[in-house]
Image: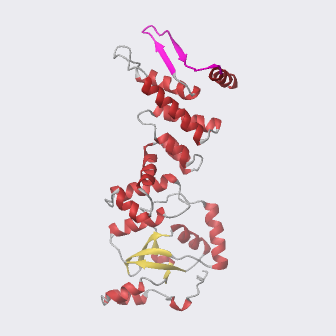
């Protein structure tokens, strides 16, 4: 197996193994434990295990191979961070991608910072450290925030302090989790931007309209501004609409169809249907320019 080659100017501070830390733990030398956990230690790679609660779930095989090739030549530049379970078992807090690449590169040891933490502290550290990564997609970040709230019992304010983001940013991410699975998957695959997803998440209690707009984004490559304009127009029209009496209220499946037409045309659409199944579809426009836009849209389809 390949030897690990960790490059650092402070190579003299690098410990060859974790035996000193283990001895300090056995003797309950708290000052020495704190000192040693601030140093980088080399751990046997077989003593390290992944964290099942790792916020990041998607790892690109090609990118892992490229990192492994780099590690073979230059060694691991940035140590991973692990939690000590016992003398020969350490669980990853951050750095699973690096750990996987090191395994592919055939390293027998890996440089790591060791933390002494309980399960709650471990989860909080893992989530917070992973949130700071640049390669996480927006849904993974949102799920990490949700875990900090649900499992670590942190408030939005506490999360804001820990990750250095304002509360509005955290709220915007959390709203992504209200989107349909199809839309979330598009965000995961980076086929849909955070800006598009945030705008769609602002549509409440209307999944049909939300999904219709999503399809429109994909098909027509709508900009975020164009999407926001469509949503704004729709919401303004909904506010100005007179409430229908209960006797004339459309059934839910027809309301969904009406909303889909409204999203398609980017204009107010009224669907009317009687008990015999006959009716009409009315598309509202304000001027000749709007009418021409609707005609062009129909001709394109």
Would residue 51 be seen by someone viewing this image from the given angle?
no
Would residue 107 be seen by someone viewing this image from the given angle?
yes
Which residue: 54% across, 51% down?
A: 188
Which residue: 55% across, 35% down?
A: 229
- Seen in the image, is 215 located left or right of residue 41? right
Residue 263 falls in which quadrant of the image?
top right
Looking at the image, is 15 positioned above or below residue 171? below
Looking at the image, is 266 positioned above or below residue 128? above
Residue 201: horizontal and vertical position, in percent? 47, 42
Q: Assess whether residue 49 is covered by the magenta stretch.
A: no
Q: Which residues are magenta?
A: 269-288
Residue placed most toward the observer, 253 or 291: 291
Work out which residue is located at the far front of the displayed protein and give it. 287
Looking at the image, is 116 positioned above or below residue 220? below
Q: Give the position of the N terminus as an image quadrant.
A: bottom right
Work out which residue is located at the far bottom of the displayed protein and give it. 12
Residue placed most toward the observer, 130 or 237: 237
């Amino acid at each position: 197996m390949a030897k690990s080659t960790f490059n650092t100017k402070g190579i003299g501070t690098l410990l060859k193994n974790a035996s000193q830390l283990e001895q300090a733990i056995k003797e309950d030398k708290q000052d020495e434990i704190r000192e040693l956990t601030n140093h980088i230690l080399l751990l046997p790679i077989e003593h390290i295990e992944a964290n099942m609660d790792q916020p990041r779930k998607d790892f690109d095989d090609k990118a892992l191979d490229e990192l492994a090739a780099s590690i073979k030549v230059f060694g691991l530049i940035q140590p991973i961070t692990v939690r000590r379970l016992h003398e020969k078992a350490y669980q990853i807090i951050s750095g699973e991608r690096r750990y996987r690449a090191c395994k592919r590169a055939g390293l027998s040891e890996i440089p790591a910072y060791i933390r002494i933490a309980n399960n709650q502290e471990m989860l909080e550290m893992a989530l917070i450290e992973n949130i700071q990564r640049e390669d996480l997609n927006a849904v993974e970040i949102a799920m990490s925030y949700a875990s900090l709230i649900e499992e670590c019992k942190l408030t939005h304010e506490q999360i804001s302090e820990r990750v250095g983001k304002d509360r509005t940013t955290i709220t915007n991410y959390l709203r992504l989790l209200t989107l349909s699975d199809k839309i979330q998957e598009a965000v995961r695959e980076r086929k849909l931007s955070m800006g598009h997803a945030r705008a769609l998440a602002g549509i409440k209690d209307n999944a049909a309209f939300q999904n219709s707009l999503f399809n429109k984004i994909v098909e027509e490559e709508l900009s975020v501004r164009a999407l926001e304009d469509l949503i704004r127009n729709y919401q303004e029209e909904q506010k100005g609409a007179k409430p229908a009496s209960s006797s004339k209220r459309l059934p839910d499946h027809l309301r969904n169809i009406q909303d889909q037409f409204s999203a398609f045309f980017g204009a107010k659409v009224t669907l009317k249907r009687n008990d015999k199944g006959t009716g009409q579809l009315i598309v509202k426009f304000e001027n000749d320019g709007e009418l021409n836009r609707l005609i062009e849209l129909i001709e394109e389809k």
